Image (spheres, helix red, strand yellow):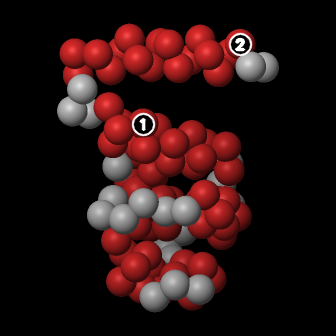
C-alpha cells in the first residue's frame, strides 16, 4: 500500500477531493477510493495521470506502484523471496 498511502497523502496535502481525481481519470469515485485504499491496483497509465494531477514526481509514484506489485507477488514466499528478487535484479541488469 505504498502507492495508495502516498497518493492519499498528496491528495490531502493539496486539499483535493477523491471525486476531483476520479473525474480527471474518468473513473467513478468508488473505483478511485478503492485504488487509494489499496483494494484495487491502479493501471500504469492511471499512475502517470495521477502524478500529473497531483504535480508530483512520476518516477516516484511508478516506483511505489511497482514495489506494491512485487510485494503482492512475493509476500507469501518469505523464505525464497530475497533470493528470487536478487536473481530478477541480476537478470534485469544484464539486459541493460
Find numbered disc 2 in the image and state the secondary structure of the residue it sits on: helix
Give me the disc on residue 70. Answer: 1
Q: Is residue 27 above or below residue 86?
A: below
Distance, label 1 to label 2, CA atoms, is: 20 Å
Foreground residue among 88 and 16: 88
Q: Is residue 23 left or right of residue 94?
A: left
- The relative height of residue 80 versus residue 4 in the rendered view (above or below) is above
Q: Position of residue 31 (x, y in %)?
A: 40, 79
Q: Judge from the rendering whether residue 92 lies leftward or rightward of residue 79; answer left or right.
A: right
Report which quarter residue 35 is drawn in.
bottom left
- Residue 79 - label: none
Q: Nearer the viewer, residue 48 or 82?
A: 82
Residue 54, can we see it? no
Q: Badge 2 is on which residue?
A: 94
CA neighbours of label 2 inside 10 A, class few (<14), some (14 to 19), many (20+): few
In the rendered image, which quarter contains the C terminus?
Answer: top right
Q: Earlier in the sequence, mark 1 or mark 2?
A: 1
Amino acid at each position: 500500500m505504498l502507492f495508495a498511502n502516498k497518493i492519499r497523502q498528496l491528495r490531502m496535502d493539496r486539499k483535493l477531493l477523491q471525486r476531483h481525481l476520479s473525474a480527471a481519470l474518468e473513473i467513478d469515485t468508488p473505483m478511485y477510493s478503492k485504488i487509494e485504499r489499496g483494494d484495487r491496483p491502479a493501471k500504469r497509465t492511471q499512475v502517470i495521470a495521477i502524478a500529473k494531477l497531483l504535480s508530483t514526481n512520476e518516477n516516484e509514484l511508478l516506483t511505489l506502484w511497482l514495489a506494491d506489485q512485487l510485494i503482492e507477488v512475493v509476500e507469501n514466499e518469505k523464505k525464497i523471496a530475497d533470493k528470487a528478487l536478487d536473481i530478477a535484479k541480476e537478470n534485469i541488469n544484464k539486459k541493460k
